[in-house]
Image: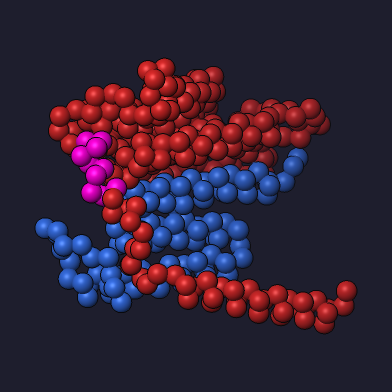
Amino acid sequence: MNTLAVHTAYTVPVGMMAALQITLLVLVAVGATAVVLIRAPVRQVLMLSIYGVLLAVLFLAFQAPDVTLSELTIGAVLLPVVILLTLAKVRKPEQ
Amino acid sequence: MTPPQRRWIFLVAGAGLVAFYLWGLSGLPGFGNYPGPYGFVILRVAVAQTNATGVVSAINFDYRGFDTVGEEFILFVAATGVATVLRRLRGERERPAVDEAADRDVPATSSAVRMVALLFTGPVVLAGWWLASHAQTNPSGGFQGGVMLATAFVLIYLSGEFLMVKRFNPADLTDVVEAVGAGGFVAIGLAAVAMGLPYLKNFLPLGQVPGAVSSSGTIALISFFVGIEVAAAFILIVGELLEQTLLIRHGGS
C-alpha cells in the first residue's frame, strides 16, 4: 500500500503511518455503522459527534489539516447541536 | 405492487448499483497516487506567486476564488432560508424563556457544564479569530475560524441563560455582520475589476516575506470577510433554532 508519507523533519516511519491510517479507516467504518444502527435519536446524535471527531483525526492522518478543522467544527460540534435543538423542538409535548 | 415484485425490483436495481460501483472503483487511480498535473503545478508556483504559505487558502481565496464566492452565498442563502422558515407564524406566540412545568423543578445547569463552558469560551473565541486571520500562513481559514467563533455562542448558551445569549446576539448586528462579510468578498473582487483587472485578481501588495501575517494581499482580507460572514451565519442559524425550541409555542392557552 502506497502511503502519502512525505519526508520532512517530522518524518514518521512509513509502516507506522500505514498502521495508523488503517486503524483510523477501520474506526471510521465502525463509527459510521454505529451511527446508522443506533436508533434512539439523542444517542444517535452523540454517536454522530464522536464519528465527526474520528473522521477529523482520519483527515489529519491523511495530511489534510484544513479539512480536519472544518470537519471538527461542523461535523463534531455544530451539526449535532442543530440536530439536538431540532429534536428538542419536536419532542417537547405542547401544553 | 406485491411484496415479491417489489423485492425483485430491488434485487435487480441493487445488483446494477453494485456492478456500476465496482466498475467505477476499478477505474480509480491507486491509493495515494495523484495523476493530474494541476496540483503539482500549484505546489511549485503558489508560494512564489502569492506569498501565502497556506497554499490551500491561496487556492480557495485566489486561484479558485470565484468558486468560493459561490460557496459563500450558498451559506448566505441557507441562513436566510432558515430565518425565513423559522419566523414566528400567525397563531404562534412567544413566551418567556422559563420552564413552566408544574410537576418538576427546573433542572439547573450543572456547575460542571457551566465551568467547562466558561473555561472554553475565551480560548474558543481566540482560536476562531486566530484561524480566520491566519489563512495565509497556516492550515486554517475564514470558514473554520468563523464556525469556531459561532461555537463560542453555543458555549455561552450552555454556561447560562438564554437571555444572556440574546444579549450577546442582537439579531440586527448578526444580520449586518453577515451582509458585510458576504458583500466584502464580492466588493474585493469588484475592486479589482474597477482597476481594470480580472474579477478577484489579487491586487494588493503581497508583502515581502512568504508566510508573514501581513503577506498574501487579498487572500488574508478575503479570509477575514469569510470568517465574519460564516460566524454570523451560523450564530443566526443556531439562534433561530434556540428561539424556536425555547420561546415559540403554538397559540392558545
Task: For residue B129, say whether it is visible.
Answer: no
Q: Which residues are magenta?
A: B42-51
Q: Nearer the viewer, residue B77 or B148?
A: B77
Residue B248 occupies quadrant: top right
Q: Nearer the viewer, residue B79 or B139?
A: B139
The image shows residue B45 at horizontal and vertical percentages of 24, 44
Q: Residue at x 41, y 28 (%)?
A: B198
Q: Nearer the viewer, residue A15 or A34?
A: A15
- Furthest toward the front, the residue is B196
- Furthest toward the top, the residue is B194
The quadrant of the rendering that contains the N terminus of chain B is bottom right
Q: Is residue B46 left or right of residue B93?
A: left
Give the answer, above or below, for where A86 lies relative to B234.
Answer: below
The image shows residue B201 at horizontal and vertical percentages of 36, 29
The quadrant of the rendering that contains the C terminus of chain B is top right
Q: Residue at x 51, y 37 (%)?
A: B70
- Name the colour assigned to chain B in the rendering: red
Residue B225 occupies quadrant: top left
Q: Residue at x 36, y 39 (%)?
A: B63
Task: For residue B17, say whether it is visible.
Answer: yes
The image shows residue B173 at horizontal and vertical percentages of 49, 20
Q: Which chain is blue?
A: A
